[in-house]
Amino acid sequence: MPANKTNKTKNQQIRPRRIIISGGGTGGHVFPAIAIAKALQKIDPAIEVLFVGAEGKIEMEKVPKAGFPIKGLWISGFQRKLTLRNLLFPIKLLSSLVKAFGIVRKFKPDVAVGVGGYASYPTVQVASWLGTPGLIQEQNSYAGMTNKMLKGTVDKVCVAYPNMERYFPKEKLIFTGNPVRQDLQSIAHKKEEALKHFGLQKDRPVIVLTGGSLGARTLNDAMAANHDLLKEAGEVQVLWQAGKFYIDEFESCDTANLPNVKVLAFIDRMDLAYAMADLVICRAGALTISELCLTGKPTILIPSPNVAEDHQTKNAMALVEKEAAILVKDQEAKQEMLLQAMALLKDQAKMKALSDQIRTLAKPTAAETIAKEILNLAVG
């Protein structure tokens, strides 16, 4: 009997630790999750990581490209109005719980991690039912519905903003910041490479404007409406990511044809874009804000009004209240966005103050901190 117990202990020690990471739906969930997985394997290359995502969502493409396996669940969000999609929700949830049960039971994770998004709930909940410790990571200053549903299930909650005890038990909270891509941590010497990559000129200010990979209608409309202003300010260069949903509509507009404006569907090298940017204009997603803090870029934020509980405005205000960014309301962007950008470029003292302040909010070791918290649960 003692010999069998010894053999069992040895087998448990030999087996690599296994971590299941679930969630996604947007890049703001997926890229931090990938950063956490890479941080785990940096600590211990033998760690096995399995992702669980929602079928048809961005994670099903991005996670395999990052080198990790992923399983898909038939799950989607719940809409606030009566739709066919809502009628299917209970069926999808039950189906996902059943499939998640099979995935967790087969993989036998030491810890289940949720990063928000549709797939997090069934995976982390089932893992808890099977006795697996859990951790969730909340990127925003306003907690997402899935994470709020899991607050009583998990052992730890990693957050990127203060005062999150409004949503989660205080004793579970760990202030870690948001994980960001490693290539953004060393951009100081990439400006020349960046200008060459994007075909822009030296010694002229650069605005990087992005509404994300899909694009933002408000930001694109504001660019299109300000042809005359951008033509007059010909010394200012603008790298404009219109997004794949909008590129066909905007790439032939008058603004896009100005010699100081370069419009793209997608910016393939955000590290280079940040390296050459004197000023960034963007939405206020949590991941974007974490990247801006790390790179220390003066920023004009235009929060999207089309998100749950207006959480982008809350994200933005966390910076504005510390004088680390400028906020322009979505409905005022067409008139104010570029006017404020041009005024800011002429005020070098203000630019430096914004840069200095936003850098103080950076959490460059967030992924490593979260990874260590996960492994502490695995040991426990």
Image (cartoon, helix red, strand yellow):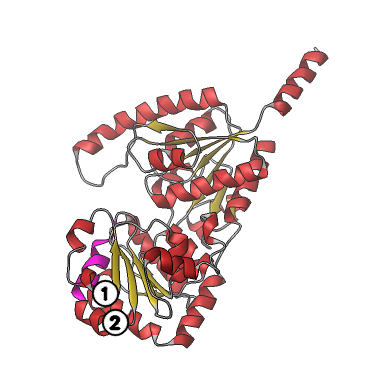
Residue at point 51% right, 42% down? 152
Q: CA distance from mark 1 to mark 2?
A: 8 Å
- Which label is found at residue 234? 2
Q: Position of residue 178 (x, y in %)?
A: 52, 56
Residue toward you, 339 or 263: 263
Q: Quadrant of residue 312?
A: bottom left
Label 2: state its secondary structure. Answer: loop
Label 1: state its secondary structure. Answer: loop
Residue at point 61% right, 57% down? 365
Residue at point 38% right, 65% down? 198
Up/down of 85 relative to 115, above or below: above
Q: Is residue 179 magenta?
A: no
* Chief secondary structure of the magenta portion: helix
Q: Residues within 10 Å of mark 1 (few under 14, many from 20)?
A: some
Label 1 amino acid? Pro
Q: Is residue 119 left or right of residue 176?
A: left
Judged from this view, the residue extending furthest toward the top is 1
Whether residue 336 appears in this view of the structure is yes
Identify residue for label 1: 259
Q: Is residue 323 left or right of residue 260?
A: right
The region drawn magenta spans 215-226
